[in-house]
Image (tube, rainbow, N blue to C red):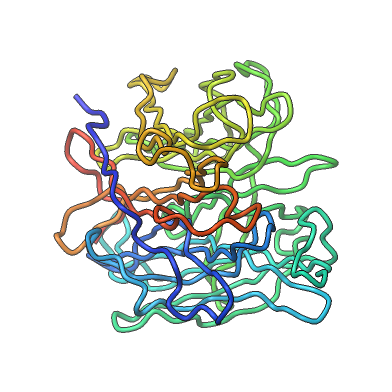
Amino acid sequence: MIGITGFTKGVVALSRLPNTPSGELWRYGGGGPFQVAPRKAAFFCGIWVEGKGNVDFVNGSDLILFDDLSNIRSDNAIPLSRNEIGESSVTVKGTVVGGFVPLGAKLVDGSPHPHAGTGFGFAYALRYALDRDGHYDYREVKERWLEFFQFGYDGKAFRVLKKERAEYETLFPGWKIEGGGLPNAIPDGQDLLLAMAVKSGEGVVSGVSRWQAGADGWQPVSFVPVTVTRAGDKGKWVCGGEPSLIRDVDGSLLFSARSADEANFDMAVWRSTDTGQTWEQIIYRKNCRARSPISINRAAAGTPYIAANLPSNCRTREVLGLWPLNENRTDFEKILIARDCRAEFGFAPSGSWWRVDHPRSAVVQLADGAWHNVLIYQIVDNLEIEGDAAMAPQTGHYVEEVFSRGEAIPAWNF
């Protein structure tokens, strides 16, 4: 019998940045884990600017290497990007998302992976008009582009091999990127598959992009929409972006995404049995979550689960739940409460509400040689983001583990 047996509920792993400029409050929060080499992993970590009343005021991101969940440190953080601030404008840099083939990785036949030790990442860059109080309107974007990275790891150092500007309209021929997914890419032979959202007409569609390595590094080569309407769909879906992708125990792909508008509080799962070429909606449940980011994940022993906030049907995000899929992948099992901030911490210090959000995970091998399902999210008092509330002791970046029954299934072949 397989299934999720429990999870950690630890204290904050990372909070304030040690090199924050005087008078500023920068703190870590959210980002996806991935494998770097045998027994070594990393995560992209977003940097948030607080106390200015700006929604989603991210200040670029760092990369942090780790091999033990009890010893997450930012001492040797690798800066990837920071915001650009002028007299009358600010360019906000998002949290990096991407993919990486770990050093020492092998293909299914046991031969060395030709692109081991390399990967890619990208993040949005949004320019806004800035008022004299340091405030901007996040809905009024003046200019946008992508920061596009090529990465390498040689067993001694993780390096940014290239960093360049890429345009939303041209990175994918025929598609305009709306945003990256939550978890990072997964392997498919020599390629990497990454969930992404793109513009489609006046709306958004989420799907799966395929990336291949060549003379210029990793580049996208195709995109297949997933969240489009098909005959036989179990519910009416309206895409809100922020998609996620995993590989199931039978080799099929499972996909989920954030919903919007009249489907704001619904959840759905799609499946592909032909490496992402065609898709079928296999689960749909209405009015079961809050209006916030959502991700599909895989426990170390293979159980798929959705991570999302529970209702009420409003913006609050105080409870993070895990919905395991049943054995036949036709519905969800009983929900598991991963974090209930109000129950654990009481009311948020500002009198507002807690955010425990942006959950994402990966199965990685750490220093003990075992495979762990590492679940990452952030916790923050809402008025630290939307106002000028003081930083709560619980605020910051959390790195937890989800435990499962059964033999672990390696995410990579070493």
**Figure check: 182 above or below 154:** above
Left or right, 358 with reference to 362: right
Left or right, 1 with reference to 183: left
Residue placed furthest toward the left: 368
Task: State the image quarter where residue 14 is shown.
Answer: bottom left
Q: Nearer the viewer, residue 39 or 342?
A: 342
Residue 211, given in percent of the width and then of the height, sits at 55, 60
**Figure check: 220 above or below 302:** below
The quadrant in which the N terminus is found is top left
**Figure check: 243 above or below 209:** above
Residue 314, given in percent of the width and then of the height, sits at 63, 30
Residue 407, given in percent of the width and then of the height, sits at 17, 39
* Residue at the image point whose x is 65% and y is 68% from the top: 93
* Residue at the image point whose x is 39% and y is 32% from the top: 322
* Residue at the image point whose x is 46% and y is 49% from the top: 379
Residue 315, given in percent of the width and then of the height, sits at 62, 35
Task: State the image quarter where residue 132 is shown.
Answer: bottom right
Left or right, 408 with reference to 127: left
* Residue at the image point whose x is 77% and y is 47% from the top: 199
